[in-house]
Amino acid sequence: MGAGKTGKNAGQPEKGRPAGGGASGFLPGAETSPQVVISAGLLKIFGVGTLIIGDSGVGKSESSLELIARGHKFVSDDVVEIFRDERGLLHGRSPRLTRNFMEIRGLGIINIKEIFGARAILEETPIDLVIRLKKWSKKMEIDRLGLKFPEDFRLAGMTVPQLHIPVAPGRNIATLIEVACRVFVLRKKGYEAAQDIVRRLDRKLARKNEQSS
């Protein structure tokens, strides 16, 4: 835990970090790739393994705490160990030293397991989605319709779908993260709200054109 990374490198894998689990830098058991350590939080939200990244102080831990209070599963705060399983799927977990712990400004270090119980904890989870929290700026370019995802996040030689959430006073970030996970699940099933409304507009325009012709 701690301040984490800041600036453009926030949330990027740390270079030169030992992988742990042996001098070779490889993890034991079913894990088949070197471990990557990344500055992020990790939760399972509506069944979606969600890596939350962003600059230090943007509200990652506070948002994660709210999500845990809503019944979602906590894996790690601030530092996540990333590895691939025997099928090549990315998984994340907490370093053993900080497992179950979270740092909240004003409260200090808290133990999630002791506060919320063992059901609030997962030792690890596959990583399905990356959510990047970004401080709101008037210069920020935003796809207001959501016609496409941002560029995939590169992690441990693989790519993971990514969504950006601007952070500003008055925005309920925990709720937005929940909705982002729902949007991700719906997109996997083939439904996209932006495309749906575009189709509706196209049909309405087509009907008007037919009536005027």
Image (cartoon, rainbow, N blue to C red):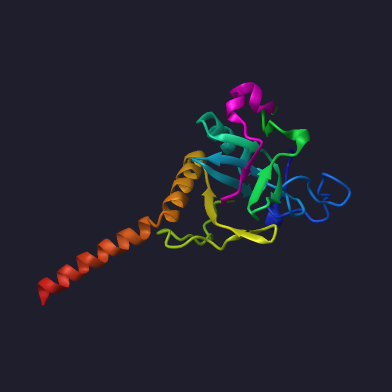
Q: Nearer the viewer, residue 47 or 141?
A: 47
Is residue 212 found left or right of 147 in the rendered image? Answer: left
Dividing the picture into quarters, in which one does residue 199 lie? bottom left
Residue 108 to residue 39: above or below: above
Question: How many numbered marks are there?
Answer: 0
Residue occupying the point 51% across, 30% down: 71
Residue occupying the point 67% across, 38% down: 77
Tell me, yes or no, whether the highlighted magenta stretch contains residue 130.
yes
Image location (x, y in percent) of residue 86: 68, 52
Quarter holding the C terminus? Answer: bottom left
Residue 205 to residue 62: above or below: below
Residue occupying the point 68% across, 31% down: 100
Residue 108 to residue 29: above or below: above
Tell me, yes or no, whether the highlighted magenta stretch contains residue 93.
no
Quarter holding the N terminus? Answer: top right
Q: Which residues are magenta?
A: 110-133
Image location (x, y in percent) of residue 39: 70, 47
Q: Residue furthest bottom?
A: 213
Image location (x, y in percent) of residue 103: 69, 33
Residue occupying the point 87% across, 52% down: 24
Q: Nearer the viewer, residue 49 or 176?
A: 49
Image location (x, y in percent) of residue 89: 63, 53
Is residue 198 found left or right of 95 in the rendered image? Answer: left
Q: Residue furthest right?
A: 23
